[in-house]
Amino acid sequence: MIKIHDMKYSIARVFFFSLILAVLGACANDELTPYYDQRTQEPGKVVIQGYNAMIDSVQIAVNGKFIEIGKAKNNTAFVKKIEKNYEFVFFENEVKTFVITNKRTKVILGTYQFTTQEPNSSLYFYVKEDLWLDSAEFLKPGTLSQSGYAGFKFIFPSVNKYSASGYTGSLDGIITKNNGQLLGVAENINKSTPSSFIEFPYSTPTGIKMELVKHGTTESYIPGKKVIVSLTMTNNKSKYIVLEEKQDLNGAFSGVEGVINLADYFSF
């Protein structure tokens, strides 16, 4: 029969021996699998603002893992607007790679890398069929200099898509009221960078028009065809318009529209 004091001694001896084994095991495996993560850690954050105007859903993966969108659990795909503050941890000099893909086709739309050099960053993008625009500075509309004004910037990604004009230089947009009064000229409209910002006093009627011409001239970029874009000015609002060439039922060039206003989809 084991006495109580002897039993206490035996339990203490077993516990002490087990503790030694645990410590030795941890040390032996330290180089392979540390029992706690010894890497330096730094918090990171990417503010995501995007708009998907496609029929197909879009997914965002970070280092190969899709992030959840919205409040529904396991929802990793989205259409229309997305706003998310994605917070994470950088381990050592880890690089976080964000890959945006079309869920159905698996086509990669954009790839971005974030490091500890800029732990708090942003990811802005707008996507529709045959159109991808990104970065906060690129998507930001112009700033009005005073109240009572209206402003515009333009970009023309689909220039020559249907017109096949052969002209590859920048365009200017001569903006007038419907009565012919000149409001100003937006310069250097092209397919890859924003035009100059133009602003003017708001007035009614709000309908205005813009004639697209070769930069520095009054000559249409399409030989023998005047190209007019209908626009609407809004008081105290700066717009960033995506110009789009359109086609008729036969596939021929039919004109240019300025319906998409990027300023409607983002907050800065």
Image (cartoon, grey):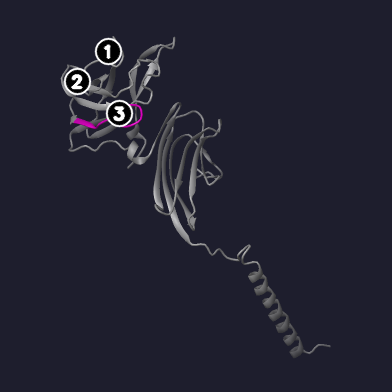
- Whichever of labels 2 and 1 marks the residue nearer the N terminus, that label is 2
For image coordinates 37% across by 19% down, the residue present is 160
User: Dot 1: within a 10 Å radius of its alpha carbon, few (fewer than 14), some, or many (20 or more) residues?
Assistant: few
Identify the secondary structure beneath mark 1: loop
Residue named by callout 2: 177
Provide residue 76's location: percent of width, then percent of height. Answer: 53, 41
Q: Which label sits on residue 226?
A: 1
Identify the secondary structure beneath mark 2: strand
User: Dot 2: within a 10 Å radius of its alpha carbon, few (fewer than 14), some, or many (20 or more) residues?
Assistant: some
Provide residue 184's location: percent of width, then percent of height. Answer: 18, 25
Q: Nearer the viewer, mark 2 or mark 1?
A: 1
Instruction: Please name the amino acid that badge 2 sits on.
Output: Lys
Left or right of residue 196: residue 12: right
Q: Quadrant of residue 202?
A: top left
Cα–Cα gap, marks 2 and 1 = 17 Å
Residue named by callout 3: 154
User: Was residue 168 drawn as part of the magenta stretch in this picture?
Assistant: no
Q: Nearer the viewer, mark 2 or mark 3?
A: 3
- Whichever of labels 1 and 3 marks the residue nearer the N terminus, that label is 3
Instruction: Please name the amino acid that badge 1 sits on.
Output: Lys
Provide residue 229's location: percent of width, then percent of height. Answer: 29, 19
Provide residue 32's location: percent of width, then percent of height. Answer: 63, 62
Quadrant of the drawing holding the N terminus: bottom right
Report the span colored magenta. Answer: 190-199
Nearer to us in this view, 22 or 70: 22
User: Dot 3: within a 10 Å radius of its alpha carbon, few (fewer than 14), some, or many (20 or more) residues?
Assistant: many
Identify the secondary structure beneath mark 3: strand
Quadrant of the drawing holding the C terminus: top left
For image coordinates 76% across by 89% down, the residue present is 6
Exactly how many numbered labels are in the figure? 3
Left or right of residue 221: residue 158: right
